Structures are given as structure tokens and as C-alpha cells.
Image (cartoon, rainbow, N blue to C red):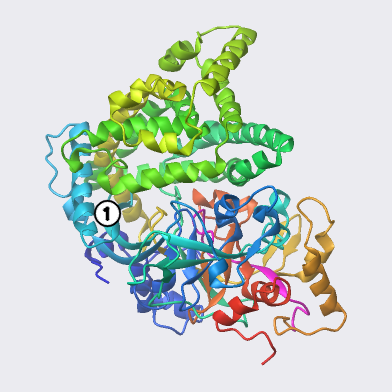
Amino acid sequence: MKTTLRTLAAVATFATALPLAADEGKWMPQQIPALAQKLRALGFEGDPQAFADLTGQPMGAIVSLGGCTASFVSPDALIATNHHCVTGALQYNSTPERNLLVDGFLAKTREDELSTGPGSKVWVTVSVNDVTEQISGKLDAKLDDRGRYDVIERRIKERTNACEAGGLRCRVASYFEGLQYFEIAQLEIPDVRLVYAPAEGIGNFGGEADNWRWPRHTGDWSFYRAYVGPDGKPAPFAKANVPYKPKRWLAVQPAGVAEGDLVFVTGYPGRTQRLATHEEVREAVSWTFPRTIRTFQEQIDVLEALGKQDPALKIKAANRVQGLNNTLTNRKGMLEGLVQGGLLAEKQEREKALAAWIAADPARQKEYGDVLNALAALQAETEKTRERDAVLGQLFAASAMLNGAHTAHQLSIEKAKRLDLEREPGYQQRDWSRIREAQERAQRSLDPRLDGALLRYWMRHAAALPADQRIAGLDKIAGLTPGMAQADTDKAIDAYIERLLADTKLADKDVRLGLLDKSSAEIAATRDSFVDLALALDPLFVANRDASKRRMGRASRVRPRYAKALLAEAGGLVSPDANSTLRVTYGQVKRRENAKDGVDWRAFTTLAGIEHKHTGEGEFDAPDAQLAAIQALRAGGTSRFVVPALGDVPVNFLSTVDTTGGNSGSPTLNGKGEFVGLLFDGTYDTVASDYDFDAVRTRSIHADVRYLLWTMSEVDGAAHLVAEMGVATARP
């Protein structure tokens, strides 16, 4: 692996006088060697340099699923991840008569393994290179904001194209607010198959009642397998394909971990905002989070009501409902932590301290004196039309048919451009197959009744916009005007939705895919109702995109200097905000004392908690086979996965690792780099650590490897997979 550390060292290391907060940091793998002293103090006996080798052990075994993390756990590319990360695959293969979302799935043989559908992929990171100078170096100071953005964007495209010439999938990612850029190259495997997922009563035991909570008793694991062509190269799904042969896979350690043990979590955390300004966090608290909480709950109510009418609709809506619920609970916790937990006030005080630090030195005033005011001005600009712009985005997200028409229209515009480098990101030639796959994948959850219900919901929001923030194209096509009486508004929207659904053919996958091959004129000539709506919304979409590019160009002058000021003021080695790139975090298996009103959280839960919580109904309905296996243990049975100190099989455990969304499915490793569990959640009262890390209270929740192995071998009949992972089920 080639990795240049010169810029990393220069930017992220200023002094060592200030100690790091306990276990904080989503570290770039190449930063881990600099943490050797602290790791050894926690009992690490390995070589920290191993984490910097992305093709070595253990990093070569870590993969991305796009939104979730996973890992190879056998030489035949068996992949472990979370149960909630395979919901789409379960949904894709489910019918009302064979509902895998409820019953789970187990392939007894390789031939039984199921395709997870178009667009499912596994990405293996193979290299990371510092390209800061190539992306942001020597920018002409005379460029205006849009011109500056365009130059940076073109440089990123050029680097990406050159990287992908080797057959890899590449990305140029920004770190520290654009202060650094790294080029990430990944092997992309498109044939991914479902191997095993436990029943809902195991994989989602506790459901939303327990989501983000402790104690937990959730078997949040599932398994995929990656396949390639007979020549060993990545290839689309085909019966003739064979299991991929990874160079690295994780050894599964059936002994698990004990309290106090050092653990690592490696994965692809999505996004944190610890470098956000106070004004940005204030807006999240005062507008973004309350709005998300309200609208997500209302959309869940709409979808669940439809699901009660028709089991097929419930399956179609399952993945979206799960995602809405998860985000809803997260944002509630965020809001409580930032306001009631005092994190917003702490953020304000630290920003005042930063301003004072800048003002105390003439050199710092010259370099950083304008950054806070400039960022506040940028924030104020985005807030002017935030409600209108959010509603526009939600309209496109609400309907698979509208999204299909909009995507096809944008693609037709970009395809007509002569040079690929001139095309918008996301619509270059490298993206065309992905666009088609996304439209194919959308079919698993597409139903006109769902589209109509969610569009009706968001059109009512659009109709309530003030006169100076209207979506003019929607007003015209749907017959809406500012100040309409509610009864008239509802009547107009209902009538338009009825026409919209009656005059479209885009529920047909082949028709929708056919649009992707048409010119702009040919698309418009279809006179499909959803095409007409997409065209009506297009002027505002384009105007918003152009305005965003101007703001990002202006931000590229300011945000890197803001980050540099924060880093210089803080001193020490600092990890960048999460940005869906490969990271390593470490901590200890650890209980939490006085978690709430004097109640302590133990570090482990056990099967006894499942017995206690089981009601046989709703979210606490453990499968009969699992209950029978537990009773067999209670009746004097034996299992190598029982821990004497607990007197039971451990189910979930707590650690102090620093994780967030995207870390779902990340393998939990012991100090030897062995697989001892799967990270799957955080705790409700500290999810606001995405904005401001709480070094005392923050805990992450893991599925214990011993519960995974016990369930697979003694409940679900998956002993062949346990053996594939090199684990014996009998007592040694």
C-alpha cells in the first residue's frame, strides 16, 4: 500500500502536551502507529504498523457494503455483517408466502445462496494516497467562488479517472474540512449473495423499543458471500461464478472477550460533525432535528397504515420504515444530548475560546481572523431557503417513479456533453451502470400506493411554504397557490395525485429503465405524468445545484483555515471527522456506572435477558427453537459458549470505542486482531457524540461472538458455516 504521511503529520500533529480524551477518535489506519504508546498502555502486544497496511492482516479483511461495514471471515469469502444491513436483500427475496424478513434465511449449500439484487456490492480498500497538492494546491487567487469550485471538481475527476484506469473503483475524499485530500482505491465485487440471516425474533429482538438502548439482547448479525467470475475477476451475478478468494480473512476467536479487554473496531463510519461551528449545530438543534423527528414519525405512520392494509405493501415498505425508525430515534437522542446534555452550550464556549486564541496573536489574527464570521455568513445564506430546498429534496426521495424520471432527465443532459470530464459528478460514464442498477433495485420497494401516499404528504408541506419560498413548478402543475384554504389545498393535491398515478407507466421497471437510453427530447415526448413533474421541478433543482457550488467554492477558501486553527489550538494528534472512509477506533470492554438514576450498566447481557424479555408478541417474540435451546441449557445441557463467570452464554457487550452510523457491521477485534463480535449500535444518551464526544459516558454495543456461534450451531442449524469459519462447536 502506498500512503504518503507527510501532510498528515504536518497537519494533524502539533504537540504532545495535551492528552487525548479517553478512546476518542475514528483514526485513519495510517495514524495508528503514532498511537503505539497509548495502545501498549491498554495492553496491546501487537504491531501498530500492521493497521497501516491495508492489504495485510487485519485490514485486508475489512470491506464496505456501501452504508454498512463487513469483513471476510473465511478463505471462501464468507462475509459477516449486521442483520439490519441485509434488510434490503431479505426484502428483495421475500414474498407474503415466504417472508424472509420475519423467518430469516439459511443456505444449506452454496447453490442455495440467494442473489441480493442489482446494485449490491462489496468494496475492498487496497490503497490510500495523499493528493492534497494535486487537488487544492496552486489555485489561482483571482478565481471567483464558482470558478474555484469548478477547478477543484475537475482535478478530482481527473485523479479519479487516472486511478480507475487500473480497473479499481476510486474516490478522492476530503479530510479536515478540505485541508487534506486522499485518493482511495477499492476493488469492487458486484456478485454478492445472501448466505444466512437469523429470524427477526433474533436479529431484531427488541425492535424499536430497545433501539439505541441498554441492556440489549439482539442477534444483529448476518452473512453474505462474495463471488467472482471463473477467472477470479469481479463479474456480475452468474451461475458459473465462484467464491472470491480474499488474501486476508479474520480468524474467529470463540473465547470472546472479558471486561477490561482492549478491543478494536475497524470500518467505514459515515459522518460526524465534531468540527461543525456553533451556528451549524444551533441550526441542527433549532430546526433540522425537530423537523426530522416530526416528519419521519408522520411518514412512518403513513407507511405502517398502508402496511396494515396489505402484507405485500408491508414488505415493500419494510426497509424504508426501518431506516426512518432508526434515524428518528437517533435524532431524538441527538437533540436531547445537545440541549439537555449541555453539549450545545459547551460548543459555544469552545468557539469563544477559539476566537480569543486567534485574537491573542497578530499572526493568528492575520491567518484566521476572518474565518468565524465568514462561516456564519455562509450558514445564514443556506438558512434563507432551507424549508423550500428540503421539501424539494424530499419530493424526489418520496417517490421511486419521480426519482426515476428525474434521474433519466439529468442523465440525458449529461450524456449529450462531449467530454466525460464536463459531466456532473454522479452522471459520468463510470456512473451509468450504477444508475441503471439503482433503478432496478428500486423495484423491490416500488408500489404506486406508497409513492402516492408519500408524495401527498410532501406536497402538503410544499403547499404550506411562504410566498417567497414557493416551488413554482409544482404550484403550476398541481394548481396550488399561496394562501389557499386547507380544504382547497387538499382537494387540489388529491386530484393531482390521482392524475399523476393514472397517467404514468413508470411503475413498470422496463419502461423506467428504457428512459435511461433516451435523449432529453425523447423523454419529454413521452408525456408521462411523472416525467412532466420532474421537468417542472428541474429549474429549481438546477438553480439550487448552482448556488450550492458557489457556496462550496467560497467555503473552500475558509473551511480549511478554520480546521487548521482548531487543530493548532488543540495540539496533539487529532483524528478527522468521519467521512465514510476506512477508520480504526479502539477502547475497552467496560461497564458504565451510574448510567441513569444510580443504575449501573453491566458490561455483558446473557440469554437470561432474552427469557426475561420474551413475551411471545411484537418485538419481543423469540423463536421457539431458540427458547428450546435455552431450556436445554437450563436443564443441564452443556455448550462451549457458556462463560463460567457469567453462568450463561453472553449476548451483547459494551465497550468505549468511538463509533457512528456506517460502523454498523464492523468487526470487533481483540488485541490479536481476531474476530470477537460485531458492532451494531450506540446508546441513546450519547448519540450526540457525533457532534461532541462524551469521553465518560459514551458506549458502543456489540453482538458477542459466543452468542453468534451458539445460535448458529445450536439453534439455526448453521454448523456448516461455523465450521467454515474454523470453529469447533464441541468443548475442547
Disc 1, SS: strand
Residue in front for this viewpoint, 412 or 285? 412
In the image, what residue type sits under mark 1? Gln
On the rendered image, what quadrant is the C terminus found in?
Answer: bottom right
Residue at 58 percent of width and 53 percent of height: 93
Query: Residue 206, position in %: x, y?
Result: 73, 55
Q: Residues within 10 Å of mark 1 (few under 14, many from 20)?
A: many
In the rendered view, would you say 558 is above or below 383? Answer: below
Q: Position of residue 226 (x, y in %)?
A: 45, 67
In the image, which residues are magenta? 644-665
Closest to the observer: 679 or 541?
541
Return the residue found at the far bottom.
732
Vertical order, 269 against 36 (above or below): above
Residue nearest the viewer, comparing 214 with 186: 186
Residue 247 location in percent, x, y?
Answer: 38, 77
Q: Residue at x 70, y 58 (%)?
A: 103
Q: In this view, does 136 lie to the left or right of 39?
A: left
Give the main secondary structure, helix, strand or loop, of the magenta stretch: loop
Q: Quadrant of the N terminus?
A: bottom left
Residue 316, image x and y in percent? 61, 42
Residue 697: which quarter of the image? bottom right
Residue hosting label 1: 180
- Considering every residue shown, the one lying at the far right of the view is 635
